[in-house]
Amino acid sequence: VVALFDIDRLGHINAAYGQRAGDEAMRIAGRMVVGGIRVEDCAARLGSDDLAILLTETTLEQALPILQSIRSAIANTPLDAD
């Protein structure tokens, strides 16, 4: 299963708080992704606000709870603008 995550409002974070805050938001999201997958899976940053996940030997039914958990973790993690 391959999944793509687009980090919403990254452009707004960059505009309001600067590029460093946007980079930190992507680092936080990346840590959430890596923390939510197995060692045999793969994660990568594709673009300025896009992350990809490859869940190996995983059915869609198995992948959905994993991906939802990662999405929720990212959505519910506050970003300290300092």
Image: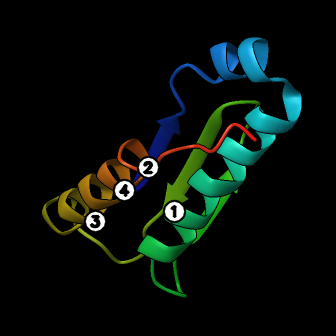
Q: How far apart are marks 2 and 3 (CA)?
A: 13 Å
Farthest residue, direction right:
19
Tag 4 near tag 2, CB within 8 Å:
yes
Q: In front of the other: label 1 or label 4?
A: 4
Residue picked out by circle 1:
33
Q: How far apart are marks 3 and 1 (CA)?
A: 10 Å
The vertical placement of 56 against 27, above or below, is: below
- Marks 1 and 4 in Cβ contact (< 8 Å): no
Mark 4 neighbour density, 10 Å: few (under 14) some (14–19) many (20 or more):
some
Kind of element beneath mark 2:
helix
Q: Sequence order check: which comes first, mark 1 or mark 4?
A: 1
The amino acid beneath tag 2 is Ile
Query: Quadrant location of residue 20?
Result: top right
State the residue at coordinates (27%, 60%).
69
Q: What is the secondary structure assignment of the residue under circle 1?
A: helix
Disc ID at residue 71:
none
Please, what is the three-letter code of the amino acid marked with disc 3? Ile
> In this figure, which residue is indicated by the disc labeled 2?
74
The numbered mark at residue 66 is 3
Mark 2 burial class by Cα count in 10 Å: few <14, some 14-19, many 20+: many
Nearer mark to the viewer, of 2 and 3: 2
